[in-house]
Amino acid sequence: MSRAAAPAVALALLLAGCSGGDEAERVNVYREAGLAGVEFVEVALAGGTDTDRRWVSINDRDDAASLAVALDFPSVPVALPACAPAYEVSFFVAGSERIDLGYVCDGEELVWGAAAGLGEGRAVAAPAEFTSQVAPYLALLAPER
């Protein structure tokens, strides 16, 4: 393997969860953010104010819970590139305030937020199940051509 290929392989292993470290390096967004008992979810284009931004609400509790449970996966945190989120996913849990997570950074499917237990400037790769479940809602938010 060439020296140039080594960083790419290391990054691939890191994103796949093969860090070589112990389990303490992994973060479970579902558990850290307290997403159990989610009642509904809002997916929105990031930016703007609450009154003028485009969003879609997932009011079916089973669908909302399924989206939250898709984040129930131990992930290795990675550095969050300097960017603003393309989307925000807000989880509304019974007896709690809304829990906001950023989603998609410079085209990368990352999840981050203060509630996720990741620390400043850290993110996790979005699990494939989360990405596939949120995709139809993102399509509803796509600008009309």
Image (spheres, grey):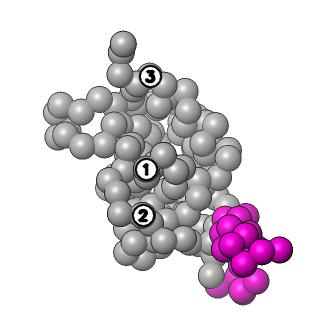
Residue 69 in sight here: no
Q: Which residue is mark 1?
A: 106
Residue lying farthest to the right in this orientation:
1
Q: Which mark is residue 140?
A: 3
Q: Earlier in the sequence, mark 3 or mark 1?
A: 1
Describe residue 141's horizontal placement relative to residue 139 as left or right. Answer: left
SS under mark 1: loop
Residue 67 in sight here: yes
SS under mark 3: helix
**Magenta part of the chain:** 1-24
CA distance separating discs 3 and 1? 20 Å
Magenta region includes residue 10: yes
SS under mark 2: loop
Q: Which residue is mark 2?
A: 81
Which quadrant is home to the C terminus? top left
Q: Residue 19 in the image: x percent, y percent?
A: 71, 78
Q: Earlier in the sequence, mark 1 or mark 2?
A: 2
Q: Which mark is residue 61?
A: none
Q: Residue at x 61, y 36 (%)?
A: 133
Name the kind of residue labelled 3 in the image: Leu
The residue closer to the viewer here, 107 or 30, is 107
CA distance separating discs 2 and 3? 26 Å
